[in-house]
């Protein structure tokens, strides 16, 4: 987003929320611009419009509220944990001899929660397999991975790049 676009966003906020009156307008533009520069104007403008139309608050939105609305709109769709376990269980049922094929069919996030094709084969051939226990363990692991991914998705691009440079990415295309 350009500095000019940031000024336009702040102008709309000032008109829409008469109580919004920063003491130093230039400094406000500079700070908002620095925080919003990696976002595009259309997304922030739509977030502002959404906030204005849906908020019952008399207070202007903060930068984080606008970014939150943009992130929510762009958030990847995650499989619900019960549905994810159903997919895993179906894969388990076919994994005595076909674990690699079944593992490859699973979405990436579910693969990360399972761990490996070998894990599918182990579950498939385990005579003491406890559906309730394994289901609970998988769902907990999957839920943690989804939350980490959501947290990662909300990070600024600069922070994501630093994390990737250090090889610490747990989600996405990087290995765990």
Image (cartoon, helix red, strand yellow):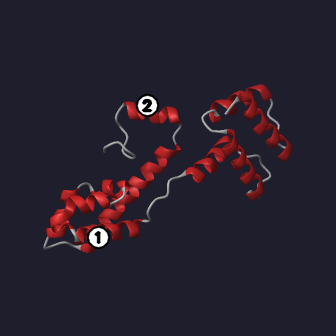
Q: Secondary structure at mark 1?
A: helix
Residue 162, numbered circle: 2
Horizontal side, residue 46 vs residue 100: left or right: right
Number of the front mark, 2 or 1: 1
Q: Secondary structure at mark 2?
A: helix
Residue 124, numbered circle: none
- Give whichever of discs 2 and 1 has the lower sequence position: 1
Horizontal side, residue 124 vs residue 46: left or right: left
Question: For the point 31% across and 63% down, which residue is it?
Answer: 138
In percent of width and height, residue 49 lies at 75, 50
- Assess disc 1: are there few (<14), some (14-19) or many (≥20) residues with their C-alpha within 10 Å of its C-alpha: some
Residue 119 sits in quarter: bottom left
In the rendered picture of this protein, how many numbered marks are placed on residues? 2
The quadrant in which the C terminus is found is top left
In percent of width and height, residue 127 lies at 13, 73
The quadrant in which the N terminus is found is top right
In percent of width and height, residue 115 lies at 26, 54
Question: For the point 26% across and 59% down, which residue is it?
Answer: 103
Q: Tell me, yes or no, whether the two marked residues, 2 and 1, touch with CB atoms within 8 Å.
A: no
Q: Nearer the viewer, residue 147 or 92?
A: 92
Which residue, given by chain and number where applicable, does mark 1 sit on?
A: 89
Residue 123 visible to an observer of this rendering: yes
Horizontal side, residue 15 vs residue 78: left or right: right
Q: Nearer the viewer, residue 141 or 99?
A: 99
Residue 18 visible to an observer of this rendering: no
Q: Nearer the viewer, residue 2 or 35?
A: 2
């Amino acid at each position: 987003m350009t500095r000019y676009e940031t000024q336009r966003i702040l102008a709309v906020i000032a008109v829409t929320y008469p109580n919004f009156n920063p003491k130093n307008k230039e400094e406000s533009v500079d700070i908002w611009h620095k925080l919003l520069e990696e976002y595009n104007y259309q997304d922030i403008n739509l977030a502002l419009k959404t906030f204005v139309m849906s908020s019952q608050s008399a207070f202007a939105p903060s930068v984080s509220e606008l970014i939150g609305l943009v992130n929510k709109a762009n958030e990847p769709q995650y499989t619900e944990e019960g549905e994810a376990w159903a997919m895993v269980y179906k894969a388990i049922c076919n994994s005595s001899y076909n674990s690699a094929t079944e593992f490859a069919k699973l979405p990436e996030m579910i693969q990360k929660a399972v761990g490996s094709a070998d894990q599918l084969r182990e579950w498939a051939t385990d005579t003491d397999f406890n559906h309730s226990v394994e289901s609970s363990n998988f769902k907990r692991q999957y839920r943690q991975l989804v939350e980490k991914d959501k947290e990662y998705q909300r990070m600024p691009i600069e922070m994501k790049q630093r994390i990737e440079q250090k090889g610490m990415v747990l989600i996405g295309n990087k290995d765990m």
